[in-house]
Image: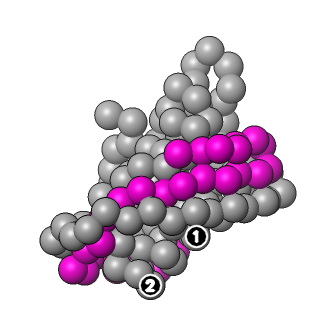
Amino acid sequence: MPYRRLEHTSDVRLRVTGATRAALFRDALRGVAAAMRPRGRGAAVTRRVRLEAADGTALLVDFLSEALALMQARRESYREARFTRLSERRLEATLRGTAVEGFGEDIKAVTYHEARVAGGAAGGWATNLVLDL
């Protein structure tokens, strides 16, 4: 499994891994979406995002924060990200998912606590994420 939920006292903690940077970002998005526990499925939706950040960790946190804001504001759940550009500091992507009736969990923020994108070698990519409830 590319992401798994870890024990945490009051928030949601995920361990995310991926063979590539794109896989890490995509699986982190899936982990956040799953943690929100979307209810009901509606029409298919797509949203475009474009971001620039100071480093790879900030880019991942900003990407997930942008997706979280869109999910909450538009009542959509994204399960797929297609990257047309993804580097250490920049990304352009299309998010794909569905409209939903609501969410069973209210995630306030994707935090920097424990977040550190590491990898690039033959071992793949990995990070921990803590989601503030």
Left or right: residue 42 compared with residue 19:
left
The residue indicated by pointer 2 is 73
Q: Disc 1 to disc 2, how far (Cα)? A: 11 Å
Q: Residue furthest left?
A: 40
Q: Secondary structure at mark 1?
A: helix
Q: Nearer the viewer, residue 113 or 37?
A: 37
Answer yes or no: do the residues labelled 1 and 2 have beta carbons within 8 Å? no
* Residue 120 point in image, percent of width and height: 68, 26
Quadrant position of the C terminus in the picture: bottom left
Q: Quadrant of the rendered structure where residue 104 is?
A: bottom left
Q: Residue furthest top?
A: 122
How many marks the image carries: the answer is: 2
* Residue 30 point in image, percent of width and height: 39, 52
Q: Residue at x 67, y 53 (%)?
A: 92
Q: Secondary structure at mark 2?
A: helix
Q: Which residues are magenta?
A: 82-109
Q: Main secondary structure of the magenta part?
A: strand
* Residue 20 point in image, percent of width and height: 58, 29
Left or right: residue 103 compared with residue 114:
left
Query: Badge 1: how crowded within 10 Å, few (<14), some, or many (20+)?
Result: some
Q: Quadrant of the rendered structure where residue 36 is?
A: bottom left
In the rendered image of this protein, does residue 68 appear above or below residue 89? below
- Label for residue 66? 1
Q: Residue at x 65, y 44 (%)?
A: 84
The amino acid sitting under disc 2 is: Ala
